[in-house]
């Protein structure tokens, strides 16, 4: 009896309690219709500027939140193979009287994410955004810090109204395209549009308390930029230009590696393992304006893939009826995610394609 | 019969024993041969000689502390007699008669001892008591549960009174949460193991005590015995599974004994954790997607842990003085399940209530004069809000750490300037609609942040009491005074994730120091066959400076009390009348901003000018003893309530009110208690209460309602209409049975007798339903008077079985305690609009439709809100009413589950206990 009592006492203390119920996972865990060209998102709003997480596990992009009254645009984290967004980087819903845009994300291997944050009051809307800044946050939603507010003036005297095409060269330096922004009305009575005009490529060291800017020489009028894995070779495009340029920073060599010629203006360059992708032609216009200056209005174009080392011609990807923006290679170079508008959509969604 | 009458006469002349912590011992000393009285015999109590018999052999020992005592009688030439198990209970007379003989070797003395509070006419209070041994034998865990067994009790409401209309008296020292007793807990809990006895007095209690108009809970603690004893117990439901395992762990350690030189020491630790601290028997939902469908028994984020530790030291100072020091600390912290945070419980609210009580008692006691000087410090702190982080569980529900609340430092500092900004820990923004529910839709369920509520208050009280008791062989007089000073601090902030602004109300804070004082005198007149008890008590309280709005003076109240008792044939009849008053909760002195009132623009203005709440009670009590072991008590009472705190309109805004003393009410009823003493292995008690409790308000926080009465459609102010109080339980029946199988009885299996020594107790409760108010579907119009509808009756059966065992050479027991044995699904609340726990179908549809209309936007495939089954056309979008509305309907059904409308389910406690 003694033994049984002690055994009972031991059992009482050793047994684990049951646990309360937990919420399950209810969202989709893969694409709706898998295939070589897979639609990842179906957002009635805009899904733009996708980039891959450095480990290839997911995609970060800017998603328009139609479920919010102010239609904030947030950074959404999507599994690499599609499915449900795991989480957002987003402003609080409490401030429904202003619209916030988180865009042009660049994700670092340690989980830090650089992005541009723009905010405008909805009630008293100005012509330009109320605030813009280059931000540094973490993918898990941790604290965000302002790296530099916008507009900014570089040490060499150039003013950037905005920046885009952010990318990490290494753990401390960002590559950006400095831009001039204008807000023309496409028509009388229409809402103002944001027109971006690339100015040049710059490098930003964000490890110092005050970011240090460095100009990449020979990149004037750059409209997009991408760096290879070493960060030494840059590929870029220029506004109103059909060519694709290369700049090797260590040697200072600059050359043209491809000319799309009659296909149209090249922009949104991406690179991985020596393969390049760019958006060419399509709904793009190059407009000299006597008041606002030269600007390039881009509503998407055709997606081309080329291999400079192979020397072959550029190959157009994607089916008919698509216009694309901002392609991004997966870290292993086998897949590409791109924002696209198909023949039935009116807003951009993300598509995933297996590369040949 | 002659002897009984003689004893009754003895008791009549013995004088009152009204003091609530002490009783008295009386008796006669006679010679065996011829029954001649022995005069001049010395009477000893424990280790002191305290009295002598008079010429008739009669003696009386006054002011004997509740508990077990040794009575010794010695006289020159006679045998010394001892009785070592005389049980004295508070306010009760124990009779110890002694028959002695001239000193010889072989002729034993005869001692008979008993207490009879039933026929004792000096017992004028209506008292129902429970002793420490019963607390251990019954299926009850806390003092509150034990007191709730009393007739006329509904939880912690007594005789229809609101919560907070009762007071605790701990070893003679008043203890009350004067800040928010009507809406909050006391803050300290008395571990049952430190008790000698607890009693509920609902009328006729001594003028020594105030601060209560519905009941007085009198607690007498152990003093430390003359030998060391203790108990170690562990109880749990770990061995069980499914709904029987609610994550319970409880440890009790207690020890008491002598420290030498007459000093005694008592220490108790009682700690309990439960993963579901507020379990419910609500039925599981029909929808298999609801996580409660498969695991309906335990709610997440609903755990609780409490720690109660008490220490007492008794030090005799010479022959007549005794010093008692008592310390008690309680901490209770709870995670609170919130349906809105069902799927993101990390943001659900939590609560912590802690209290400390330090008391000192210096007593000078002789048999004719007793003086008691008591001083106490009582502190209580309450906080409710969001936690900075979820505490990890270490063992069961025990976290072993103090909860940390977002913004707690600001609240403690009452820093209303700093609180104008988003509170620390809430800067990240407010809540958003949850994406984790099975329904996905942006409605009902919250995530990302708490609701931003933070409520904190602190109550500190220093109290001093001086009590005197003067008595001779036939008279007693009690008088004394007390004074207390409180320090009250409160802080409230809503929407703490936003800065204070146009849509965000400023934080509310208050700090003031009321003082209270009281004096009393009480005595008894004895006739041949009657006793008249007369007492008067004077109370005053002053809100003090610092109360926002005004500087006010003291409020005063004089409360006479009168009782007449007489002995009829085989029965005692007591008629009593008393006036009782209590200072209002101090929370009514300051502006109230509770729950959603800050956000809706409605508020209740505090009123520093409110005064005492009063009750006048008439009662007739008949006590009889049909047989030696059976007693019957019948009480009939009528209590008039006046000056109750309620809300009255403030200006022209009918949604804004001010607290005031203007409500009145009436509670009348009858109680019958039939008891068979626990002898010959069994005992039983049956109590029944019939009552009607009505007033012009049931809750001071209720907005004034305009009520449409009669076919003419007149609209009148409810202050002119009485309706049932919230605790108006018309019928309540409680049956307690207990039994014990004799040692050595029963079949022998495997060398043991499994049922030998088995003890059992069962409690059967049947209560008619409490009242509730019905409204129309929109909730803006009352259907009938407030509280004019009734919930269905509730009943439960609780059982405790205890088997004595030898464990490691020590006496121990193994026990199982089962509450709600039949797993009865009792309905404890209903919706006002449907009269049922569940929302009705039209109401549910309306709720879902409103939610859909607020968010009709499509849900895309990649959204965490996307639910494949709802995308009927498989186009990657859940869109339109046809696809979205079913999700909103399911979400509404999930959100409106009436979890807490149902009472607790069947609950088990398996325990091992070691006595030493």
Image (cartoon, rainbow, N blue to C red):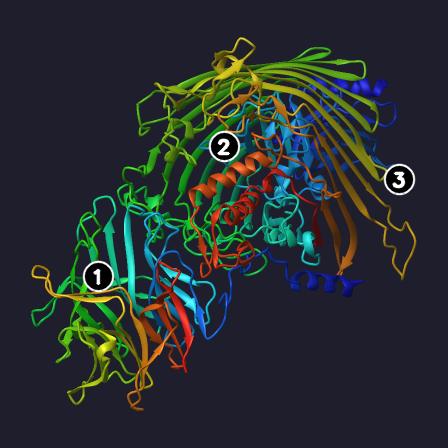
Q: Which residue is mark 1?
A: A133
- Residue B320 visible within the image: no
- Residue A229: x and y in percent read 30, 83
Q: Quadrant of residue B219?
A: top right
In the picture shown, does residue B546 fall above or below A192? above
* Marker disc for residue B181: 2
- Residue B486: x and y in percent read 40, 33
Q: Numbered disc 3: what chain?
A: B
Which of pointers 2 and 3 indicates the residue nearer the eye? Answer: 2
Which mark is first along the chain, 3 or 2?
Answer: 3
Q: Is residue A36 left or right of residue B896?
A: left
As helix, strand or loop, the secondary structure at mark 3 comes to loop
The outermost residue toward the right is B747
Seen from the viewer's position, the closer of residues B278 and A250 is: A250
In the picture shown, does residue A79 fall above or below B592? below
Q: Numbered disc 2: what chain?
A: B
**Where does the C terminus of chain B fall, quadrant-wise?**
bottom right
Seen from the viewer's position, the closer of residues B892 and B82 is: B892
The outermost residue toward the top is B712
Q: Numbered disc 1: what chain?
A: A
As helix, strand or loop, the secondary structure at mark 1 comes to strand
- Residue B810 visible within the image: yes
Residue sitting at 48 percent across and 13 percent down? B715
Q: Is residue B391 left or right of residue A133?
A: right
Do residues under tags 1 and 3 come within 8 Å of each other at their CB atoms?
no
Q: Is residue B766 left or right of residue B663?
A: right
């Amino acid at each position: 009896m003694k033994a049984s009592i002690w055994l009972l006492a031991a059992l009482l203390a050793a047994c684990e309690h049951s646990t309360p119920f937990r919420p399950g996972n209810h969202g989709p865990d893969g694409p709706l219709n898998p295939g070589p060209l897979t639609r990842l998102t179906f957002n009635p709003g805009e899904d733009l500027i996708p980039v891959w997480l450095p480990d290839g596990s997911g995609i970060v992009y800017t998603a328009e939140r139609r479920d919010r009254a102010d239609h904030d645009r947030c950074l959404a984290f999507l599994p690499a193979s599609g499915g449900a967004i795991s989480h957002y980087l987003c402003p609080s819903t409490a401030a429904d009287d202003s619209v916030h845009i988180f865009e042009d994300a660049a994700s670092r291997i340690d989980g830090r994410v650089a992005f541009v944050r723009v905010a405008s009051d909805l009630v008293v809307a100005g012509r330009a955004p109320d605030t813009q800044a280059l931000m540094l946050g973490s993918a898990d939603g941790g604290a965000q810090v302002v790296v530099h507010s916008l507009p900014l003036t570089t040490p060499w005297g150039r003013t950037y109204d905005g920046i885009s095409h952010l990318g990490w060269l290494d753990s401390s330096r960002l590559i950006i395209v400095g831009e001039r922004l204008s807000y023309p009305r496409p028509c009388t009575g229409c809402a103002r549009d944001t027109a971006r005009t690339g100015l040049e490529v710059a490098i930003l060291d964000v490890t110092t308390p005050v970011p240090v800017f460095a100009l990449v020489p020979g990149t004037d009028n750059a409209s997009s930029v991408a760096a290879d894995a070493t960060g030494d070779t840059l590929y870029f495009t220029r506004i109103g230009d059909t060519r694709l340029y290369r700049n090797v920073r260590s040697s200072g060599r600059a050359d043209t590696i491809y000319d799309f010629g009659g296909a149209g203006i090249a922009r949104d360059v991406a690179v991985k393992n020596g393969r390049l992708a760019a958006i060419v032609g399509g709904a793009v216009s190059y407009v000299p304006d006597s008041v606002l200056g030269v600007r390039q209005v881009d509503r998407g174009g055709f997606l081309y893939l080329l291999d400079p080392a192979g020397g072959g011609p550029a190959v157009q990807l994607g089916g008919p009826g698509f216009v694309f923006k901002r392609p991004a290679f997966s870290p292993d170079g086998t897949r590409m995610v791109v924002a696209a508008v198909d023949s039935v959509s009116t807003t951009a969604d993300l598509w995933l394609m297996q590369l040949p | 019969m002659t002897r009984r009458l003689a004893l009754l006469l003895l008791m009549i002349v013995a004088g009152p024993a009204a003091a609530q912590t002490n009783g008295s011992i009386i008796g006669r000393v006679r010679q065996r041969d011829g029954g001649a009285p022995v005069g001049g015999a010395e009477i000893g109590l424990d280790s002191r000689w305290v009295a002598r018999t008079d010429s008739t052999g009669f003696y009386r020992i006054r002011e004997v502390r509740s508990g077990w005592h040794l009575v010794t009688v010695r006289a020159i030439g006679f045998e010394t007699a001892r009785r070592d198990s005389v049980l004295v209970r508070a306010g009760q007379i124990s009779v110890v008669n002694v028959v002695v003989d001239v000193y010889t070797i072989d002729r034993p003395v005869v001692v008979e001892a008993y207490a009879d509070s039933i026929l004792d006419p000096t017992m004028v209070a209506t008292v129902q008591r429970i002793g420490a041994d019963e607390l251990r034998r019954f299926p009850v865990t806390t003092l509150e549960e034990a007191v709730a067994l009393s007739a006329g009790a509904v939880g912690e409401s007594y005789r229809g009174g609101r919560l907070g209309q009762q007071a605790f008296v701990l070893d003679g020292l008043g203890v009350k949460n004067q800040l928010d007793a009507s809406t909050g807990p006391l803050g300290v809990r008395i571990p049952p193991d430190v008790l000698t006895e607890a009693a509920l007095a609902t009328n006729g209690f001594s003028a020594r005590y105030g601060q209560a108009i519905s009941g007085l809970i009198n607690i007498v603690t152990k003093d430390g015995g003359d030998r060391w004893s203790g108990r170690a117990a562990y109880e749990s439901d770990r061995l069980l599974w499914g709904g029987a395992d609610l994550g319970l762990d409880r440890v009790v350690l207690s020890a008491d004994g002598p420290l030498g030189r007459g000093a005694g020491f008592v220490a108790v630790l009682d700690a309990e954790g439960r993963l579901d601290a507020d379990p419910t028997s609500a039925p599981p939902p029909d929808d298999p997607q609801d996580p409660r469908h498969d695991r309906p028994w335990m709610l997440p984020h609903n755990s609780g842990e409490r720690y109660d530790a008490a220490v007492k030291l008794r030090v005799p100072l010479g022959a007549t003085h005794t010093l008692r020091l008592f310390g008690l600390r309680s901490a209770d912290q709870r995670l609170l399940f919130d349906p809105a945070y069902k799927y993101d419980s990390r943001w659900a609210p939590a609560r912590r209530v802690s209290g400390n009580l330090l008391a000192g008692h210096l007593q000078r006691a002789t048999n004719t004069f007793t003086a008691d000087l008591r001083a106490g410090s009582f502190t209580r702190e309450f906080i409710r809000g969001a936690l900075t982080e979820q505490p990890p569980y270490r063992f069961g529900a025990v976290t072993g750490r103090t909860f940390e609340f977002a913004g707690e430092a600001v609240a403690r500092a009452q820093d209303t300037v700093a609180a104008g900004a988003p509170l620390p820990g809430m800067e990240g923004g407010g809540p958003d609609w949850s994406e984790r529910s099975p329904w996905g839709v942006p409605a009902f369920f919250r995530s990302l942040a708490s609701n931003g509520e933070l409520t904190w208050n602190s109550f500190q009280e220093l109290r001093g009491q001086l009590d005197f008791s003067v008595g001779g062989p036939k008279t007693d007089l009690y008088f004394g005074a007390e004074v207390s000073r409180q320090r009250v601090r409160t802080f409230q902030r809503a929407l703490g994730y936003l800065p204070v602004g146009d849509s965000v109300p400023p934080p509310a804070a208050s700090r003031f120091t009321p003082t209270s004082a009281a004096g009393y005198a009480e005595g008894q007149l004895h006739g041949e066959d009657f006793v008249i008890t007369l007492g008067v008590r004077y109370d005053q309280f002053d809100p003090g400076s610092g109360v926002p709005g005004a500087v006010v003076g003291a409020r005063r109240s004089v409360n006479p009390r009168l009782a007449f008792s007489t002995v009829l044939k085989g029965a005692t009849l007591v008629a009593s009348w008393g006036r009782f008053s209590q200072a209002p909760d101090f929370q009514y002195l300051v502006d109230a901003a509770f729950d959603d009132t800050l956000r809706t623009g409605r508020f209740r203005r505090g009123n520093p000018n409110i005064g005492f709440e009063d009750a006048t009670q008439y009662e007739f009590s008949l006590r009889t003893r049909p047989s030696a072991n059976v007693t019957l008590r019948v009480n009939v009472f009528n209590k008039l309530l006046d000056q109750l705190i309620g809300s009255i309109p403030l200006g022209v805004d009918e949604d804004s009110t001010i607290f005031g003393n203007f409500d009145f009410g009436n509670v009348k009823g009858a109680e019958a208690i039939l008891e068979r003493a626990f002898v010959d292995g069994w005992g039983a008690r049956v109590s029944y209460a019939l009552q009607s409790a009505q007033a012009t308000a049931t809750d001071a926080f209720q907005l004034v309602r305009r009520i449409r009465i009669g076919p003419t459609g007149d609209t009148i102010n409810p202050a002119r209409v009485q309706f049932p109080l919230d605790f108006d339980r018309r019928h309540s029946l409680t049956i307690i049975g207990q039994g014990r199988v004799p040692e050595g009885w029963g079949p022998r299996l495997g060398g043991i007798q499994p049922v030998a020594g088995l003890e059992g107790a069962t409690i059967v409760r049947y209560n008619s339903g409490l009242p509730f108010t019905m409204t129309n579907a929109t909730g803006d119009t009352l259907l009938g008077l407030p509280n004019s509808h009734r919930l269905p009756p509730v009943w439960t059966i609780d059982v405790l079985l205890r088997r004595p065992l030898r464990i490691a050479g020590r006496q121990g027991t193994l026990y199982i305690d089962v509450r709600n044995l039949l797993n009865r699904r009792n309905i404890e609340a209903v919706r006002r609009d449907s009269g049922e726990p569940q929302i009705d179908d039209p109401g549910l549809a309306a709720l879902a439709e409103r939610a859909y209309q607020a968010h009709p936007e499509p849900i895309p495939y990649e959204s965490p809100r996307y639910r494949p089954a709802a995308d009927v056309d498989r186009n990657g979008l859940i869109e339109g009413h046809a696809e979205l509305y079913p999700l909103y309907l399911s979400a509404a059904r999930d959100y409106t589950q009436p979890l807490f409308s149902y009472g607790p389910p069947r609950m088990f406690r398996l325990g091992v206990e070691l006595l030493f």
